[in-house]
Image (spheres, helix red, strand yellow):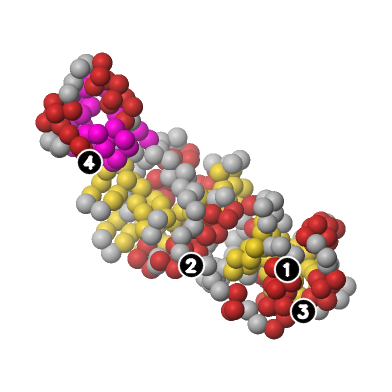
Amino acid sequence: MNRQQLIEDLRTVLAKAGFFLSDKHDTRLICFDIVTRRDDDLLIVKVLTNIDSFNAQNAMQLKMISGILGASPLLVGERSGAGKIEDGVIYSRFGVPILSLTTVSEFLLEGVPPFVFSAPGGLYVKMDGDIIRRIRGKKRVSLGMLAETAGVSRRTIQMYEDGMGATLDVAIRLEEFLGQPLVVALNPFSHKEAPVGEALDLNMFEGFERDILDHLGKLGYSLIPTARCPFDVFTKDPKTVLLTGLGKLAKPLERRATIVANISRVVERDSVIFVDRRRVRENIAGTPLIGSKELKKVKDREEILEIISERKK
């Protein structure tokens, strides 16, 4: 299956599962392929047939964007150099969960979650440590006896009780010995850790774009640049996150603004484009436009939000 077909099939699965999807875009220059929401589940998804092309920089950007928006990053793929992405298994690369299309479909459409995850050394499962501890106490099973049954050390049994993953054969031995299901389902969409890695430098911006960012900084906003993204910067304060674009009014900017407007509706955050000169036009596809001269007259963040609210209508 080629990448475009994989994207189409994934979009179909997500739509059937009741997710609100971002529009299709035909550019490979964006670090994600789908932004999608269902209730409180917000996913930023990258799709690759061969996940070996997914590198540390891709992962950093995907996690950074997801972290700021309160979303879960996800990579959907078919294979790697090591072989097929197996169904029912959660893989990970640079801290981003990886699933096959079938695993996504089974989880969302059939309610069948994955139980197995891949980590260095092989495939593992999570066991309910509280159940192990409770049954061990109830049946008066010592750590040593349980360790001997599982073929591991007593310290390892304690680590299982604290949530460490176990190999499949160990989990089966413990379940048979204790007479109780221990393996727990995994939620591949629960990954919402803070982003890691160094942020991009604002020095990548020059001229009027840098002047705009400097003024926004003086107004009290934190500015987080992006890479391979339709918007250039996250402009944020404790209450607000703005998907922010910068540029001169031209067709390339208009295409980007249209994509940003659509994404902002899915992630439920406002977007804005700061331009060198704004004439009559107030927005592009619902993304408000603010000229550089207008911005220089703005005295506080509340005024920015008022302009955005007026012009996105």
Residue at horizontal 79%, vertical 68%?
289
Asked whether, in this view, residue 87 is left or right of residue 38, the answer is left
Q: Which of marks 2 and 1 is nearer the N terminus?
A: 2
Residue at horizontal 15%, vertical 37%?
153
Q: Which of marks 1 and 3 is nearer the N terminus?
A: 1
- Residue 246: x and y in percent read 69, 73
In space, the residues marked 1 and 3 are separated at their CA atoms by: 19 Å
Determine the residue located farthest toward the right in the rendered image: 280
- Residue 264: x and y in percent read 67, 56
Q: As shown in the figure, which amino acid type bears the numbered disc 1? A: Lys
Q: Which of marks 4 and 3 is nearer the N terminus?
A: 4
Q: Give the range drawn in magenta.
A: 157-185
Q: Earlier in the sequence, mark 4 or mark 1?
A: 4
In space, the residues marked 4 and 3 are separated at their CA atoms by: 58 Å
Q: As shown in the figure, which amino acid type bears the numbered disc 2? A: Glu
Q: Do the residues labelled 2 and 3 touch (CB within 8 Å)?
A: no
On-image quarter of the N terminus: bottom left
